[in-house]
Amino acid sequence: MQRIKSLSDYFKKYELSEKDPESFWSEIAESFTWKKKWDKVLDWDFEKVNINWFQNAKLNITENIFERNLKERGDKTAIIWEPNDPSESPIHITYKELYEETCRFSNALRAKGIKKGDRVIIYMPMVPEAAIAMLACARVGAVHSVVFAGFSSTSLADRINDCQAKMVLTSDGNFRGSKTIPVKPVVDEALEKCSTIESVIVLERTKQNVEMINGRDHWWHDCISEEPKVCESEVLDSEDMLFILYTSGSTGKPKGVVHSSAGYMIYSAYTFQNVFQYDENDIYWCTADVGWITGHSYIVYGPLLCGATTVMFEGVPTFPNVSRFWDIVDKFKINQFYTAPTAIRALQAHGLEPLKNNSLDSLKVIGSVGEPINEEAWHWYHDNIGKGNCPLVDTWWQTETGGIMISALAGITPNKPAHASLPLPGILPVIVDSEGNELLGNNVQGNLCIKFPWPSIVRTTYGDHQRCINTYFSNYKGMYFTGDGVKRDHDGYLRILGRVDDVINVSGHRMGTAEVENAINEHEEVIESAVVGYPHDIKGEGIYAYVIINSKSSDDTIKAEIVNVVRRVIGPIAKPDKIQIVSGLPKTRSGKIMRRILRKVASNDFGNLGDTSTLLNPDVVEEIINGASL
Ligand code: 7RM
């Protein structure tokens, strides 16, 4: 794998990637295993959104993880698994063992009729089998779609139906902190609304009682018990779908972001290697869940493609106490630690006491992802976890980008607090104003677009290509629009300012305001609702809901019911933090809700509400301010 060694090397590679992207990427691609090489490196069209990397090449990503690594690293630990309960023993799985387990499960998938192109839903806790499930799908050419196990049965059913999945891989239950959460019953409930699922494979984890439906449901251990430890991999085309991952946007329905095989493989591996500057014997830990893109690219694919040792943690940062993260760092002598600002802020709130028995001396690199990291959290993380001598990589990217786009390279790019800093080689960011004019030079602020394809760019939104075009490629002609605001400072370093659309980022989780509104509106006494984000000390953004109701129940009762509806429809992560019952919403004469005003009120920033003269109902603003739930 090509490795950037110094700042001047970075600038050199960046320049090459800009001048001659095809030779730049093909040189990187050469270090992978191909069944057949490409005819052409790149063909692209941002109008019809037709992007073709490594045209007509054939490969299987799992051969690049296993066959390519086994000779040198067969006995090296691939995954260290730390269970929820620290008194349960961790598990170390070597590359050879992971290969064999993946093969056995691949055979099991084939035995249940899974073929290339079939969609398989993975709804599992953070256990090694979740990674094995992903890899086995990839090995047989099935398209996995991991659904975060905290999502409700409704959300799960929506995703199954959208991609017409044939199979669900799940567990009996899930250990999370002091709780044991049922998982299989959620799947059962979802499947009442789905007709495409032929089988369900259930991993035994919590050993709680679950109902197994004859003919449909099978135990994981039974499925693999007779299967051999070898399994021929399916030959895939570069552009064959590797996975679908659902993500929220500004409309109500989550989109199935599609990633393809070759481009995603190359980009996740290249960025992992270079951003974290992984060395052969390092132990790397990313605290994300495999249900999100960060887990896909930087727990599973990127690290395993690079032959790294990657840690998977089943639990939560606060169980059995708030030292848990730091105990794990010391326990496995973690060298690279990658987490989200929300976790940092939550732990920061407990002060330095929880750190007093930890050395953290093994750390070489610390990373941040998922949301803007505020300067205070940046310094706390840098000074107390990195002890002032670890580079902090603030990595900006998205589900749709597949891998890290803008970030310092550990130990190479000078650190600048709260700045994602510089684009990776091959990434051409542009800042545009609302008319789409490119803002050149330094000290400019605007919307972040990317004007050239990179290997792991989103290929389509599953089942609705037009939606992909409309969402990402129509706002600014000839460019991919990220939905984020950005500032280029006087040094040319980039600082991400957060979403400029109706997406809010709650504890690093993307949430469409429309999605939350739709859930709230399911309550039969709700007439209308409007959801906005507001600054939240720990979560980054909190969810503030304005709700018009037609009810005789007390406000407190209805608020509690609304919270429950959202929990049931989406999942606990989307619960509103604040609910204000209102008699009306500020609307323009054309009937559009003026969210700008609602955002200001929710942020306790009434001073300058801006122009309210176009409002149909200016009186309601006063009422909203007076009743604001602050
Ligand atoms: C990886 C991930 C994407 C959105 C993105 C941003 C925000 C992510 C950073 C960040 C500032 C960062 N994928 N975001 N990383 N904002 N600095 N380092 O999170 O699809 O779930 O979310 O997250 O708004 O558009 S995601």
Image (cartoon, rainbow, N blue to C red):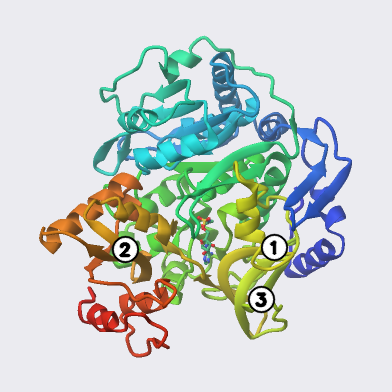
Q: Give the quadrant of residue 214.
A: top left
- Along the viewing direction, whichever of 7 and 420 lies nearer the viewer: 420
Residue 105 percent location from the top left of the image: 54, 21
Q: Amino acid at mark 3?
A: Val
Quick check: 388 above or below 42?
below
Judged from the image, the secondary structure of the residue bearing numbered disc 2 is strand
How many numbered marks appear?
Answer: 3
Q: Give the quadrant of residue 471.
A: bottom right
Quick check: 99 above or below 468?
above
Q: Which residue is mark 2?
A: 529
Residue 424, labelled with which disc? 1
In the current view of this chain or complex, which residue is farthest to the bottom?
607
Q: Amino acid at mark 2?
A: Ser
Q: Amino acid at mark 1?
A: Leu
- Left or right of 407: which side holds 36? right
Q: Earlier in the sequence, mark 2 or mark 3?
A: 3
- Along the viewing direction, whichever of 493 and 534 lies nearer the viewer: 534
Determine if the C-beta at disc 1 is less than 8 A from ligand 1.
Answer: no
Residue at 64% in and 37% down: 242
Judged from the image, the secondary structure of the residue bearing numbered disc 3 is strand
Residue at 54% in and 17% down: 108
Residue at 49% in and 68% down: 372
In front: label 1 or label 3:
3
Calculate the distance from the C-alpha at mark 2 to the C-alpha at mark 3: 32 Å
Q: Earlier in the sequence, mark 2 or mark 1?
A: 1
